[in-house]
Amino acid sequence: MAELTKAGLERVALPDVALFRDATEVLFALAEARHRRHPAACPAPSRHFVTNADEAHRIALGGPQPIVGMSLDDLLDCATAGDPHSAELVALCGVHRGFLELMARPGLREIADLKGSRIAIDTETGYARGLLHVLRQHGLERDRDFEIVYAGATNLRYEKLIAGGFDATLLGAPFTSLAMQDGYRSLGRMADALGGYQAIVLVAHRPWLAGNAAAAQALRACIWETLAWACDAAHRPEVLDLLAALLPAGHEACVEAVADDMFGAHTDFLRDGVMQQADVDAVVALFNGSSGRVIDPRVLASVLAMP
């Protein structure tokens, strides 16, 4: 993809993005708020928020948004779905490793305590594969030891968890910190349990990229510039100020924890968009072991050939 100067990127209209209300959206919302305050800073793209992974799949394969933020597992699922557009899909860049923690209601202190519980997922794809694998590692089998509840995207699962709709679910930033403030407990980080994990990537179609290389590059530049700014300790006061305005009412007190999780030294964001091989390998192993399909190495190489 041809390189553009910063001035050139500033003149390029950003493509619309379909995504979940997860850490990626927090980053875009920060970019938006920063741009309003400092017009010379990069703007944010227009966003459409999906309610579950099924909607993300439909948009990734058929539009209308040209870019979709979805898990690497979901990209693999779409790339092997046999859709006429499956072979066109490619990861534009990696965004983050998930920030994923298994959050449980008060009183549940370890994974073994989940026996007899109701555990929520979005759909059978994506993070659910990792969660079910971790539960099996701890001797818990679906239907025998716990009930699965379908509860939609991360923000919706957070709301339903707090409302008592089920006992546990995987959450990512900023919802892990919000849930902890509400008295909920983390039973462990997904990446630690799996030995690595690649979560969100930006997905595009090769034909679209062929005609919109500058727009794609401008979108990546927006992510990397905003992330570099947010992770710079010199900007911490302003980051906290803007971030506090993005949190749900009543959770302003956990803004420091959210900032530490998302933009601290151990952030799950990928500062250069490059995925770690161990994280990719973990996702591929889960996909091959539980999807009913084994991804062809040539298909994997194609979807990971970031332009």
Image: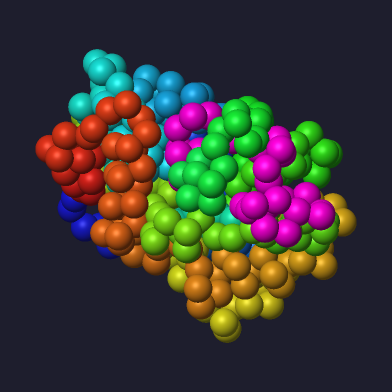
Residue 45 appears in the picture as rendered:
no
Q: Residue at x 35, y 47 (%)?
A: 283
Residue 241 location, quadrant: bottom right
Q: Position of residue 128 (x, y in %)?
A: 50, 38
Q: How is the image coloured?
A: rainbow
Magenta region: which residues?
A: 102-130
Identify whether 285 is placed above or below 83: below
Residue 115 location, quadrant: top right
Asked whether, in this view, residue 243 is left or right of residue 278, the answer is right
Which residue is situated farthest in the left direction here?
Answer: 298
Which residue is situated farthest in the right direction here?
Answer: 250
Magenta segment includes 274 = no
- In front here: 282 or 19? 282
Magenta segment includes 124 = yes
Q: Residue at x 63, y 36 (%)?
A: 145
Question: How many discs appear?
Answer: 0
Q: Residue at x 54, y 51 (%)?
A: 138
Asked whether, in this view, residue 278 is left or right of residue 87, the answer is right
- In front here: 27 or 39? 27
Q: Position of residue 176 (x, y in %)?
A: 67, 56
Residue 82 appears in the picture as rendered:
yes
Identify whether 234 is placed above or below 226: below
Q: Position of residue 181 (x, y in %)?
A: 80, 61
Asked whether, in this view, residue 107 is left or right of residue 302, the answer is right
